[in-house]
Image (cartoon, rainbow, N blue to C red):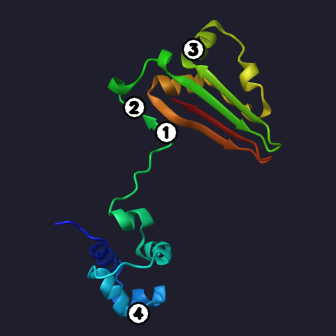
Amino acid sequence: MEETLGKRIATLRRDKGLKQDELAQQLGVTPQAVSKWENDQTCPDITLLPQLAQILGVSVDELLSGKAAQVEPAVKVLPVEQRKDLKDMVLRIVVDSAEGDKVRVNLPLSLVEAAMDMGVDMSQITGNDALKGIDLGKILNLVRCGSVGNLVEVESAEGDIVRIFVE
């Protein structure tokens, strides 16, 4: 049996401990309107959906589809069998300065690894004030342990935004 919008509204309303007339009052509609929604005779006006979803404690997408939003974590730690070789991965550094400057650096991780192994000074990359204190060696170790995604995100007091992620 397919779950309809009306059935979802009724279930969510009951889960919140609300009566039809209480929900109707909060939305500024009649209890009969809520009853018609729940019996799938009519649907709520589209302008009511954000407020209805908020009252029922779900997103509009979840209210309409019945499926909870899948939020991807900023960082994933992949199991060993799902990890890529470092030569197939890229370290991306994004800097958006408060003055409007935009810096985008894309480095193959194998290059970062080779530079670190040879003792190359990476200050050209990390010497930027917005990147001060970023240790590429530690980031490389995180990736070796299976971490991928948005590894570092910093917003300075001056309004500079730095993101370091691996894909």
Marks 2 and 1, Cα distance to the nearest angstrom?
Answer: 10 Å
| Separation of residues labelled 1 and 4 (CA atoms) | 46 Å
Residue marked by disc 3? 113
Q: Quadrant of residue 25?
A: bottom left
> Which tag is nearer the camera, tag 1 or tag 4?
4
* Residue 149 x/y as whole percent: 51, 35
Amino acid type of the residue that numbered disc 4 sits on in the rendered structure: Thr
Q: Is residue 165 above or below residue 10?
A: above
Q: Is residue 100 left or right of residue 145?
A: right
Where does residue 86 sit, x and y in percent of width and height? 48, 18
Q: Is residue 13 above or below residue 70?
A: below
* Type of amino acid under label 1: Val
Q: Residue at x 35, y 86 (%)?
A: 34
Residue in the picture at 38% in, 63% down = 62
The amino acid beneath tag 2 is Leu
- Label 1 Cα neighbours within 10 Å, binned few <14 / some 14-19 / many ≥20: some
Q: Which mark is residue 83?
A: none
- Of residues 26 and 43, the one nearer the viewer is 43
The numbered mark at residue 30 is 4
- The CA span between labels 4 and 2 is 51 Å
Q: Residue at x 47, y 22 (%)?
A: 144
Please tell me which residue is depicted at 44% across the width and 79% down the height of the picture. 45
